[in-house]
Amino acid sequence: MWFLTIMCVSCLLMGTQAQSSASFRRANDRNGRCQYSFTVDSPTEASCPSLGSSSEMEALKTRLGLLEALVARLVGGEAVPELSQGSGSQSGLQEAYNQMMGENTQLQREKQRLDRKVQDLQQRMEELRQEAVRLRSRPCMQQPPPGVPQNDNSFRPGSGPVLSHLVSRPGNTQGDTSSLTDPAWHYESPGYQELTAVVTEVSAPNLDGPADITGCGDLVWVGEPEMHRKADSIAGKYGVWMQDPEAKEPYGLEMVWRIDAVGSEVRQLFGYENMDQLTRGFPTKVLLLPEAVESTGATMYQGSLYYQRRLSRTLLRYDLLSESIAARRDLPHAGFHGQFPYSWGGYTDIDLAVDENGLWAIYSTNKAKGAIVISQLDPHSLEVRGTWETKIRKTTVANAFMICGKLYTVASYTSPNTTINYMYDTVTSQGKAISVAFKNRYRYNSMVDYNPVQRKLFAWDNYYIVSYNVRLGKQE
């Protein structure tokens, strides 16, 4: 072990840089170990005072003791008491300590602020998670408002179970991860001949008298929209609702059916005992369809739900009595999933409709170059009975429906005051431009269908379920 001996320690500590001679010596001590000696003359002192009487040495020891105690307590996390102000050195130590403690306090406050911010973020994340769970697991039955009596017999007997909760439908209106904004659809064909239309004046019947509810005729008037219910959440921004004009047991003509079409896996079919229960929001039946629905083109007819299977041109007939798929068939050459939708988008390539003459499909094909094609379907087997090709592009109209074997198209889905602008008669295979006033009160009409028994148009306009009275007559 080597030792370095410093002579006159207090002199060295208190002195300035040595300006006199210094000497260095190395020799073995009495035990034979190597010992180094380094000697420096004090520039101010002729001799070292006695250690026992040196006030400077005592002050140095005092300061060193204070420093050791301060460091020990700071390392150990203890509070350090105030130091006395007896000397300039102690005052400097006190000032340094106070500055250190002030910085420590600021750090503690910053840490507390960050901890609070993290807690707020965690609370917000929990709120969002609970909201997502609520949207995905909304109860089928809701409590009636105060003052409205409970309806103990609200559930109609049926062959299948009633679901108490919805199955989750994640994310997107048309896909799994995209936003709820519908995509823009464009289809251009340089060889296609556009429809040239001249607005025709319509001679309407006396609208003050009773409506003619017998027989068929041309659509000559559409009334103001009547609102029946607003959807509870974003899942109901657009959808489809209907009544079966030829209902079968166990459900009657008053039964109302609804499908919320927002989502990538739409499979829930809600049933309401009547219009009053729809308005109050109390479903009496919730069926889980075996295969997902594509968009808002479904319809109800003769005890079955007819709809397009998601991501395909396959049509399905879902029997309400057996609660199973009773028939399936591909619609020949039909575009699907964004090839030939209505102008509002929504993958509305295939639109099923019912009128006085039966079941219809409204769609387009590559051969038709985007023009609307109409096919009448066998309601049992879904086989195509007849097909007609019109001269109006499907992507240029907002929606379409059938009345008495005639196709009618709506010009706009957002304009508050638009028109039904085109009619095609499957009997004469002739089409023409017309102008019948039509209102989109809520500025986003994603579904328009006709009910031949109610003699009404059913529509879904930006969360709102609405209906329109219509009149049929003779267009001149």
Image: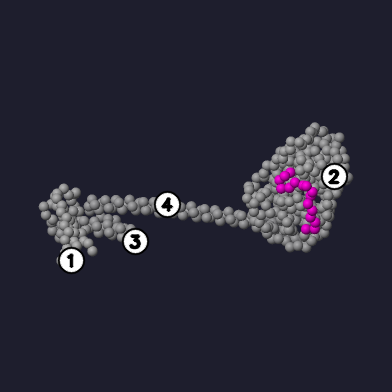
Question: In percent of the image, x 83 and y 38: which residue is there?
Answer: 431
Which amino acid, mark 4? Answer: Glu
The quarter of the displayed image where residue 142 is located: bottom right
Q: Main secondary structure of the magenta part?
A: loop
Compared across the picture, whether 152 is left or right of 211 comes to: left
Sequence-earlier tag: 2 or 3: 3
Say how the picture is coloured.
one colour
- Magenta span: 325-340
Compared across the picture, whether 3 is left or right of 112 comes to: left
Q: Residues within 10 Å of mark 1 (few under 14, many from 20)?
A: few
Question: In percent of the image, x 74 and y 38: which residue is there?
Answer: 189
Q: Secondary structure at mark 3?
A: helix
Looking at the rendered image, the quarter that the N terminus falls into is: bottom left
Q: Is residue 181 visible?
A: yes
The image shows residue 64 at horizontal and vertical percentages of 24, 57
Sequence-earlier tag: 4 or 2: 4
Sequence-earlier tag: 2 or 1: 1
- Residue extending furthest toward the top: 198
Please tell me the numbered disc located at residue 76.
Answer: 3
Between the residue at mark 1 and the residue at mark 4, the CA separation in whole angstroms equals 60 Å
Residue under label 1? 32
Q: Secondary structure at mark 2?
A: loop
Which amino acid, mark 2? Answer: Gly
Residue under label 4? 110
Which amino acid, mark 1? Answer: Gly
Question: In percent of the image, x 83 and y 43: which residue is there?
Answer: 388
Front of the two marks 2 and 3: 2
Is mark 4 in CB contact (under 8 Å) with mark 2? no
Between the residue at mark 4 and the residue at mark 3, the CA separation in whole angstroms equals 22 Å
Looking at the rendered image, the quarter that the C terminus falls into is: top right
Classify 467 as above or below 69: above
In the rendered structure, does residue 119 fall within the stretch colored magenta? no
